[in-house]
Image (tube, rainbow, N blue to C red):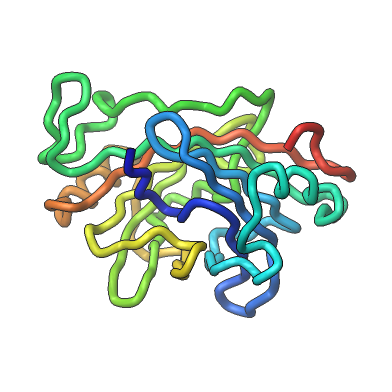
Amino acid sequence: MTTTGLLDLGAAEIVDRRTGELLGYAFTVAHGKGQLQRWLLFRHPQNELEIRPPPASMASWSLADWQANVPGLWRPNGFYVWAQADVYRHGDTYAGVTWTQIPTAERLPLPTFPERPGGNYQLDWTGKIADVLQENWRGRTFVVRGLTKASSIEYWSLPAEYEPAGGKRTAAIAVGVEEASSLDTFVDSCNRTWSSGSTFVITGCVNYQGAAAPFGP
């Protein structure tokens, strides 16, 4: 099973794309219809972040290594996020529908939420489409709800040229200028460039914030 999505499998480093400040780390495994991502964030990224390859000491980590080291990496009031990213590819058929275009909001598949109580994700709803930047490629992402809510959903539209970030590649998320008052507006915008090789990722997210690391990360 191919799990092409936002992240490469294994560990990744997360920094502020404007200042280079270390924001935390992520760890990704293949799971379900795509990938299950775990994000350990020292503070709210405010929709401005870059995903980089991990430090050499983390490059060969297994999930068990990640889980064992989370308590030592934790900073008080940090965020821990479980995010199930379901991947849909241009031209493939899902539930009898061939995705030559991204379906309208009411016809999109429901997100899959990780089995974890409470939660949300590292991005926030702003009423704008956020840019996903990698070399000369540009993708898009749109958030329903956000960090202060019990849960959130992210929709990612990635071009055919995009390569998962974290293993060897970097990618940046930046607040965009294009308005999106609704998920349908976002889908309409994505369909302008939706073509062979493109992927659409629906991510259901739950989150923990606290003074100590979460139990069972």
Residue 179, position in %: x, y?
A: 34, 55
Q: Residue at x 60, y 50 (%)?
A: 27
Residue at the image point whose x is 65% and y is 25% from the top: 116
In the rendered view, would you say 62 is above or below 119?
below
The front one of 56 and 116 is 56
Give the residue at the far top of this rendering.
95
Tell whether 26 sits left or right of 214.
left
**Between 142 and 179, which is closer to the camera in this rendering?**
142
Q: Quadrant of the N terminus?
A: top left
Residue placed most toward the observer, 202 or 72: 72
Residue 92 position by quadrant: top left
Residue in the image at 37% along x and 70% along y: 134
Q: Is residue 115 left or right of residue 170?
A: right
Give the residue drawn at x 63%, y 43%. 147
| Residue 176 location (% of width, % of height) | 40, 64
Against 59, is 94 above or below?
Answer: above
Q: Picture coordinates of residue 110 (x, y %)? A: 38, 24
Quadrant for residue 185, please give it.
top left
